Amino acid sequence: MKKMFKLAVFAALIPILAFADDFWVGVFAKDTGFTGQSYTTSKSLSRLKTKIDNEWNKGYDLIDVSYGHDVWMALYATGTGYTQQAYTNRRDLKKFTQAVEAYRAKGFQLINIEYGAGEWFGIFAKGGKWKDIHFSYTRYFEDFEKQIIQKWKEGYMLVDVEAAEGYWAGIFAKNTGFTNESYDVVDEWKYVSSHIKKRWRDGYRIVNIEYTAGEWFLLFAQYPNPREELFANNEDIEDFRKTIRKYWKQGFYLVDLADGRD
């Protein structure tokens, strides 16, 4: 996309440490529209589903799921605007796509995807602001890039990415509120910070950080009004929990989860 907007950058950056093992990554932001937040962790997918149901009963909506360190982590919020939600998982991507279409026929839109422990996991919602949501996948990154460009030309924005089992999968939507979009692919985590700083200076904000096929896929967008945001990483889940609580106290919401390695 060629159109560019200059926005002031109000952002904080957490020092980045290189780890030999997997580590958790979180993107935090203000002015999200959320009114509350929670998260849960689970060792098994069956237990994850039970915890999701429990959070739904408390009035929270499921907004993101990530898998790492043999742990599923689910992120919730209130104030999303969703009126109804569902989730599904399939081991085969083609069967997952069929499930996506079945939910679409019932009025549910796919809002988030994750791959973990041999399962493709999808979050669905009714009542969200995104419109005309499309899910697609390709075998090669070059084809995925061509698809992104084509979707941009058609007025869509990329809102989530997942790479697993030799596939690149993406969710595209209209009415995202983004005025422009871009992405970077970075070989090593130690270079992620400089890429994000540059994008912040250019008026972009982080949409999605994803560890994909040994690389970091950084998805950025420009908003009509810039939001204050930061990102942080922790190797240990307990330290990551402390980080989440720390930034909650400062008025930030956790908006994106990832797990990867340097």
Image (spheres, rainbow, N blue to C red):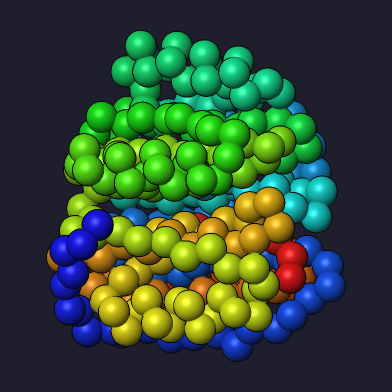
- Residue 91 horizontal side relative to residue 84, left or right: right
Instruction: Identify which residue is drawn at 47% across, 20% down.
Output: 100
Residue 47 visible in the picture: no
Vertical position of residue 186 compared to residue 134: above or below: below
User: Residue, x 29% and y 79% (percent of image)?
Assistant: 202
Is residue 38 toward the left or the right of residue 243 in the image? Answer: left
Q: Nearer the viewer, residue 49 or 175?
A: 175
**Can I make out residue 14 in this image?**
yes
Q: Disc count in the image?
A: 0
Residue 210 percent location from the top left of the image = 57, 56
Please provide percent x and percent y for residue 117. 78, 37
Image quadrant for the C terminus?
bottom right
Q: Is residue 53 left or right of residue 149?
A: right
Foreground: 78 or 237?
237
Give residue 162's position: percent from left, percent from top. Answer: 57, 44
- Position of 7 with respect to 103 (left or right) is left
Q: Quadrant of residue 193?
A: bottom right
Of 15 and 94, the residue lying toward us: 94
Q: Quadrant of the N terminus?
A: bottom left
Q: Residue at x 30, y 39 (%)?
A: 151
Q: Locate residue 19, reporting x and y percent.
A: 79, 76
Q: Nearer the viewer, residue 53 or 136?
A: 136
Picture residue at 47% right of the left edge, 65% below the top = 184
Q: Is residue 171 above or below residue 11?
A: above
